[in-house]
Image (spheres, rainbow, N blue to C red):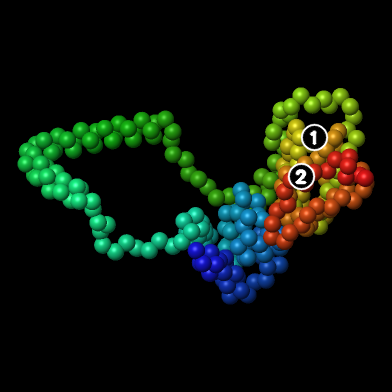
Amino acid sequence: MSREVMDSFFSYLKHAREASGLPLEEISDQTLINMKMLEALEQGEVQSLPQAYVRAFIREYAAAIGLDPAETLQRYDQWLEQSATGAEKEPSIGAAPQPEEVRQASPARASLLDQMPIIWKISIAIVVLVLLDVVLWSVLEKEPMREVKELPFREVIREMQERTDTTLMVPVGAASRTAPDSLTLVATTTDSVWMQIALDDTIMTEHFLYPKTSRQWKAKNSFLLVVIGNPAAVTFTLNNKPVSIPVRRGFVTRNVRFDRSSLQ
C-alpha cells in the first residue's frame, strides 16, 4: 500500500483540526492527552502510543475538534483493515471462472432440485430452520450478548491511575529475597509517561506517571525496563547516579537493564 493511503486517516484528522482553528495545546488541555501523544497521533505513529488506549485518544480528539466520534472511529477501523491487507481491495468485475467439472456438475444439481417434489423442499427448509433456531438459542442462553462501550479518555485516565503500581505477574522463580534490597531506581518525568518494569526478573509492575512527578523502586540485583512510552520525558537515577536510556522520537523504548554494573 502506498504511503499516501496509509497516512490518509491521520492526514484527515490533522486537516480537520487545522480547519477548526484549534491548536494542539488547546486540545491537550481539553482532553488531558499530552502533546507528544497528540503529535504522534497526527503523524500516524500509533506504535508509540499505549495500544489499549488508542481508540480512546481518537474518540476524545475527534470530539474536541468537532468531528463525530463514532464516524471517526469507523474511519480508523477502515484504515486498520487496509493496513492489515496491505492494499485496497478492487471491486470484482464479473463472476470468477468456474472449473470445468463444476460447470458440468451445476446443471445436474439444478435438474435434481427441479425434480424434487415441493413438499420435500418445504420439509427440508423447515428442518434446517428448526436446527438453526436450536443452535442459536443454545448459544445465546450460554453466553448473553454484552454491549461493548467506548470509555471517555477521562475515565481511561482514572482507570490507569487505579492500575498504577499493580502487580502484573507474581514471582515465578525461586530467587531468594532474604537479603535487603540494595538498588534504588528513581524516575522523574517532565510529561506523561507509561512503563512496565521487572524487578529482579521476577515481578513485573505497570505504571502511568503524570508530568513533573517522581517514582521510586527497590530491587536486590536488577531492574528491567520492559517498555517505556514517551521515553524523552523521563530521566532515571540508580542509587543517586544518573543512568541513560535510548530515546528515539516516535518510538517506545524497550528492554533496558540496570544492575550493579550500571554503577561503574
Dot 2 lies on which element? strand
Where residue 58 sits in the image (x, y, percent)?
A: 58, 59
Label whose residue precedes the other's in the sequence (2 or 1): 1
Residue 125 shown left or right of residue 159 in the figure: left
Q: Which mark is residue 129?
A: none
Q: Which mark, by number, is residue 200?
A: 1
Q: Quadrant of residue 25?
A: bottom right
Q: Is residue 233 above or below residue 136?
A: below
Residue under the point 24% across and 33% down:
130
Q: Residue at x 67, y 71 (%)?
A: 23
Three-letter residue code for mark 2? Leu
Picture disc at residue 225: 2
State the image coordinates of residue 224 (x, y, percent, origin top left): 77, 41
Q: Hey, which quadrant is residue 220 in on the image? A: top right
Position of 148 relative to 67 (above/below): above
Give residue 100's position: percent from left, percent from top: 20, 51
* Residue type at numbered disc 1: Asp
Seen from the viewer's position, the closer of residues 129 and 112 is 112
Above-or-below relation of 134 to 85: above
* Numbered label tally: 2
Element class at badge 1: loop
Q: Residues within 10 Å of mark 1 (few under 14, many from 20)?
A: some
Residue visible at 27% across and 57% down in the picture: 96
Q: CA distance from mark 2 to mark 1?
A: 11 Å
Q: Are marks 2 and 1 in contact (CB under 8 Å)?
A: no
Residue in the image at 71% along x and 28% along y: 172
Image quarter hosting the C terminus: top right
